[in-house]
Image (cartoon, grey):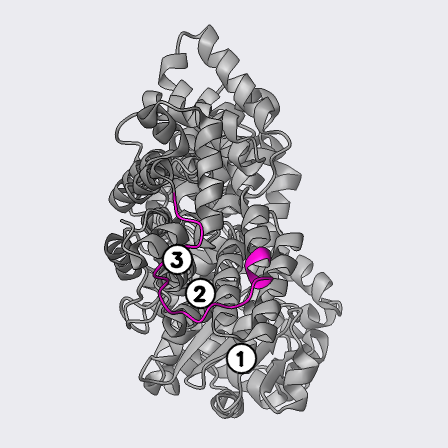
Amino acid sequence: MTSPLIATKLYIPKPRQGLISRLALLDRLSEGLAGRLTLISASSGYGKTTLMAEWCAERGQNYPMACVSLDEGDNDPVRFLSYLIAAFQNVQEGLGQDVIAILQGSQNPLDAAILGLLINELSAVPNDFVLALEDYHVIETREIHQMMIFILEHLPPNMHLVILTRADPPFPLARLRARGELSEIRAKDLRFSLDDTTAYLQDMVGLNLSEENVQKLLDRTEGWITGLQLAALSIQGQENPSESISAFGSGQGYIVDYLIEEVLNRQTESLKLFLLKTSILNRLNGSLCDALTGQNDGESTLEHLDKANLFVSPLGGEYRWYRYHHLFADVIFNRLQRLYPERIPDLHLRAAKWFEQHNHYHEAIEHALSADEFQYAADLLQSDALDFLATGNISTLLAWFKRLPDDAIKEHPRLSVHCAWALMLAGRLDNIEKFISSAEDVARARNELDRLQGDIAAVRAYAASRQGNMERARDQAHKALEWLAEDNLTVRSVMSFILGGIYYMRQDFPNAFAAMEEASRVGELAGNINVAVSALSAMGSVLVEQGNFDEAKRSFERALKLSTGRRGQPLPIASSTYAGLARLHLARKDLQSARHFAQTGIALGEQWENADSQVGSYLALAQAEHLDGNIAEAQSALDQAKRLAATHNLWAGVENDIANCEAILKTKPASGAAKTSLLDPLSGREVEVLRLFAEGFSNQEIAEKLIISLGTVKAHSSNIYRKLDVRNRAQAVIAAREMDLL
């Protein structure tokens, strides 16, 4: 079971009781809604989240909020986008479901198609709303930064983005600033003034210091809110606070080290030990703390820390989650490393086991790896990696695999297979066989190969198809389908699709149709609409080749039904369907419809960044323009197809398709009138071959049926094409029907 998204990361921050209100800053936040981006940028402890929480409570009632509290684990692009969508669903239920549906099967989850689809859904939200991303500085992945820039550049007018961060993100801030689309709140704005400091010390803490001491404290902390909070905790109850204030150094680093040590030293030994042991956690609750400390006072201790303002923030949720203030967590964890480094692995292991028991597998794996418990981490990964693969969390998986020693992966054959899948889906085919051979050897030595051989064959089939080795791909796909478990629907659908593609390239249309029909059926059952839509589109193309236009149309319509979004818009994965519809209407000589479908296929293919469907659509468009007498437009479309083919690794038959299109464009466009006679009539045997074309038989099947050689079938085919002045089977069947030869 895949770890669910952590609900507490999506909660809207709530203000603590008894805060100093920052009215001027609240006004600036409200005014900033007129632009695209509000950037709250300052180092830790300046009250960024507190300010946002106050604004949400005081001014944000009319603005539905989508909030995500980010951490280092969100550097996986799919995980990041999944959290964004989950946050948006707090604004409008069901928003982004179409994106989730296609996200799983995409090898490029952050392409323009998916983001464009998401932005279109966001623009349809009836209210103005705000997306707030807290701790954006933890994001280091270039693809995520590019995604956020894309969203910013295409931000719908009903949406505003707020970024809370310790460091400026790599966004085009200067351009946004010049356009008046950026509102900035920085450390200089967040610092407490003398009045703020006086009010905080008197009203919030109960310290009545002289104006001189307040000014001295302000000078020492430079208005840094956490520094003031630490200082107040440090001098509470002291008879002569002036001496303590005079002892403070300047600079945040010194203040943190000095004051947190002061605060810690004033706590009981049991509480200090509690803080140290739980400092490894990103979020805490009573039960989890008990697992780490061996005590049963976790919940009451967290409540005490919260009431005493000792640097915990409540997050809410079923388990009453909290988190430590980042600075405080850093200091106490550093102290744990200094005093008790030998205890850290055991603490991580205890945390891993708690998270596993409570079905939070992502965090369980992270803590197991941090404990250097590699066999345990591999066990967790082996049982859960397939779900991470299915949901597209490839970057996260590869990062985990990188942290595991080779021996740990080798000892888990199924994990080796999952690692091979992750590498393939990331486009890295070089080391696939190393993992597969290792899995095969270990499984064989343990007499477990029968349970794994289907998965191994599937990986080899997929890799061979990507590398253009179709013979090996076919053989391995057949083995995979024979050996795979019946309930392994996702992989079975992919294997059937691979076989269908191989048969189609060989013009073995009956087998191609059967394989694609199975791929679409199983793909739908598996919820993999990418495979299902692609297979249905391929089925339609097979039927066009066979001249069965009505059935082809029905197959394309089924594909369109699956690839239509909630608001009735075609999803980008429908690009191959529109390319097929263009070929269908081209075969029917309906040039206007062929042109329309080809142009739609091109546009969707560009959104999806799918060169295969774009080339198919461009070739259909070139032929439609040629038949309509638009010579320049036809050549332009052909040139676009050739350019894409030269810069992408496309299907094996693309060169022949381009060559056929070039040959067609060199002929004189026909008037479109039906031919009624032939200068060189078809022979009786050629008519027999033509009839078998229309019935969908492959060249080999025709040879066997007519008891002639395969070479003779090909010779008859060439004669038929020449006499009918066509380039392929589909055109031959159409022309023959127009002349009443069939």
Q: Which mark is residue 201?
A: 1
Tags 3 and 1 in contact by the CB under 8 Å rule? Answer: no
Tell me where residue 721 appears, x and y as whole percent. Answer: 46, 48
Q: Which mark is residue 49?
A: none
Query: What amino acid type should be assigned to the residue bearing mark 3?
Result: Gly
Please say whether residue 325 is one of the residues in the magenta stretch.
no
Q: Which mark is residue 580?
A: 3
- Determine which residue is flagged by label 2: 601
Mark 3: give few (<14), some (14-19) or many (20+) Cα within 10 Å.
many
The prevailing secondary structure element of the residues shown in magenta is loop
- Quadrant the N terminus occupies: top left
Sequence-first tag of 3 and 1:
1
Mark 2: give few (<14), some (14-19) or many (20+) Cα within 10 Å.
many
Disc 3/disc 1 C-alpha distance (Å): 72 Å
Q: Which residues are magenta?
A: 663-682
Tags 2 and 3 in contact by the CB under 8 Å rule? Answer: no
Sequence-first tag of 2 and 1:
1
